[in-house]
Amino acid sequence: MDFRFSITKFTIAISLTSEFVFPDFLPADTALLSEAASIALAQNIQRQPIQTSLASGAIATTYVHQGTGHPPMLLLHGFDSSVLEFRRLQPLLAKHCSTWAIDLLGFGFTDRPSKIPFTPEAIKTHLYYTWKALIGEPVILIGASMGGAVAIDFALTYPQAVQQLVLIDSAGFAKGPDIGKLMIPPLGYLATEFLRRPGVRHKVSLQAYHDPSFVTPDAQLCGALHLQHPNWNQTLVAFTKSGGYNFLANKISQIKHPTLILWGDADQILGTADAEKFQQAIAGSHLVWIGQCGHVPHLEQPQTTAEVILKFVR
C-alpha cells in the first residue's frame, strides 16, 4: 500500500488545497506534510551543483541554510534519512548562529550519479567539497546516529574544517549489520524493497522514540520522502556492500577536537553503553544524558538538545 493512504483524509484535504510552495525537485508527496516544522524546513531546502573529485560533472546537493552569525554549525543526518531530520532542531540553533543541514552523498535528496562509489570515503569527499563551496570556515560539526560516524571520519581527515564536535546518539562503535554479502541481485533489491514498506519503517520509528506519540503520519512521511529518488535502491545496496562505518571504532580515540556527546537515556536503536565508550575514548569530551528520550533527541526533545549544544559552544 502506498504510504500516502495511511494519512487521514482530513490531512490530505488540507495538504492538497494548501498554498504552500515547495522546491520542484522534491517529490510531489511533499505537499502531504502537515506539521508546521516539516513544512517550513521543506520549503527552505535548496539545491546547488557541487564540483568534486568524484566525477567530472557536478553533484546536485541539497541543503538547508538558516540563521546568521558565528560560529557556523553543520548538521549531518543519520542512515537512510535526510535534512528533514533536523526540522525541529535547526530553527532553534539558527536563532543564534548560521546553520547548515546537508544531505549526504547517497542519501536524502542529493543526486545519486551513476558510477560513483557510494562509500564512506566518497561521502567524506563530497562533504568536504560541499563544506568548501558553501561554508569555507571551521564549523561546529553536529552528527546524529550515522551522521556522528560521518562527523568523526570527517574531523579526523579535515581537522582544519572543524572547530568543535557534537555527537548525538552516534554510530561509530556499534557495528552495522553484516548483510553486505547478501546485497547481490536479486537479494539486494528484495532487501531494499523490504525496508521501503511502510509497516517496517513504522516499527523502526517506534523504536527510535521513547514516546510513541511522536510517530505521526507527518513524521513517517518526513522519513520516507527520499525513498522516491529513482536511485534509492541502488545507492543503499552500494553503501551497505561497502561495510559502512565498521572501520571507525579504533580511530575514535584520535579525535582532538572539543567534543560534546548527547545521548537519549532510553535509546533502543544503539542502546546506551556506547555513550560512555565515546566519553572514555575522546579525551576531554563531555557526556550529557537527555532524560526520557530515545535515539533521536533532536526530534523528541529539540529544545533541551539545542540548549545543551548552545551552552557547550559558548
Image: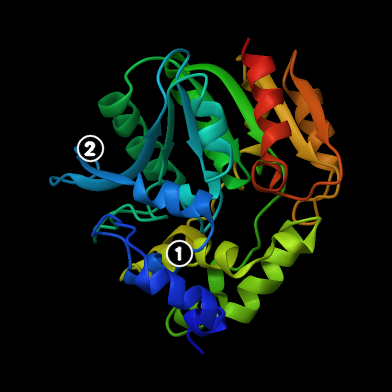
Front-most of residues 106 and 24: 24
Q: Tell me if I can see residue 186 in this picture.
A: yes
* Residue 156 on image: x %, y %: 52, 24
Q: Disc 2 residue type? A: Ser
Q: Residues within 10 Å of mark 2 (few under 14, many from 20)?
A: few
Q: Decide: is 126 above or below 184.
A: above
Q: Decide: is 194 above or below 303.
A: below
Relative to 160, is 254 on the left or the right?
right
Instruction: Tell me the quarter of the picture where residue 54 sits.
Output: top left
Which residue is located at x 76 percent, y 51 percent? 270
Q: Disc 1 residue type? A: Leu
Instruction: Tell me the quarter of the picture where residue 58 sits.
Output: top left
The residue under label 2 is: 53
Query: Which structural element holds mark 2?
Result: loop
Which residue is located at x 81 percent, y 24 percent? 280
Q: Tell me how far mark 2 sits from mark 1, CA to CA.
A: 21 Å
Badge number at residue 236: 1
* Residue 265 on image: x %, y %: 85, 43
Relative to 86, is 231 on the left or the right?
left
Q: Residues within 10 Å of mark 1 (few under 14, many from 20)?
A: many
* Residue 201 on image: x %, y %: 61, 72
